[in-house]
Image (spheres, rainbow, N blue to C red):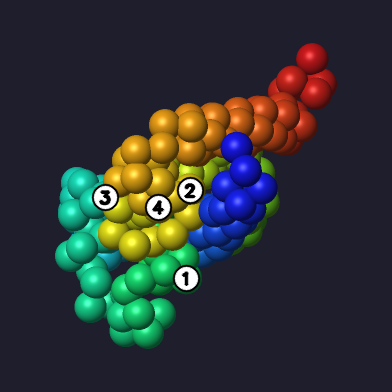
Amino acid sequence: MSQAIFALLAEATRDTLYMVAVSALLGTLAGLPLGVLLATGRRGELLAMPLVNRVLGAVVNATRSTPFIILVVAIIPFTRLVAGTSIGTSAAIVPLTVAAAPFIARIVEGAIREVDAGLIEAAKAMGATPFQIVRKVLIPEALPGIVLGLTLAVVSLIGYSAMVGAVGGGGLGDLGIRYGYQRFMPEMMLAVVAILIVLVQLVQSLGDGLARRVNKRIRTA
């Protein structure tokens, strides 16, 4: 492959990393508190808000039920409102974040629900407030599961970022479609797929290692 192709691959990889990193960060900022509310907001739970919990759950389910490529097209007016355009890597961050936030919220909800109820009761007996229990008991105890879930979310975002290339989102997906498919350059398509595989492997290894580090049960074994 020529230097021009290497330059295109490098630029597309940089764009993909930019889209995934920013959308993962924004999705986590939105999904973490949402997941905590979903896990603790039911009737009889720590932060009981049954009506709010049902509404949030319905919104999360609706977003997660929508296929990503349809979601990208459906929220184009919102994307234009936020990013000023619906084309390019910065615009692609909007649908990626909208897709990531509810996914991460369900991951956080699941991880928190696995925390031993005895720990919560012990914290209540010691006089901890609900927010102290969330901050000092639930999130630390659920952290290994949350980290593994976030790893899964980032891996999914890498796949989604390639998908937005079909609608002008830029990055490796856009490169693979424009050069690998439309200009019939199989070597470009193979290079794009190879880079995506390497990115996923790196993210998965990093996430697995980080989850082991924050897992107190493994460290004390």
Residues marked 1 and 2 touching at CB (< 8 Å) = no
Q: Earlier in the sequence, mark 3 or mark 2?
A: 3
Label 3 packing within 10 angstroms: few (<14), some (14-19), many (20+): some
Residues marked 4 and 2 touching at CB (< 8 Å) = yes
Looking at the rendered structure, the secondary structure element under dot 1 is: helix
Report which quarter residue 132 is drawn in: bottom right
Quadrant of the snapshot with the C terminus: top right
Tell me the residue that label 4 is attached to: 174
Which of these two is toward me, 131 or 1? 1
Identify residue type, mark 3. Answer: Phe
Tell me the residue that label 2 is attached to: 172
Q: Earlier in the sequence, mark 3 or mark 1?
A: 3
Which of these two is toward me, 61 or 23? 23
Label 4 packing within 10 angstroms: few (<14), some (14-19), many (20+): many
Tell me the residue that label 3 is attached to: 68
Tell me the residue that label 1 is attached to: 90
Q: Residue at x 37, y 84 (%)?
A: 84
Residues marked 4 and 1 touching at CB (< 8 Å) = no
Q: Nearer the viewer, mark 1 or mark 2?
A: 2
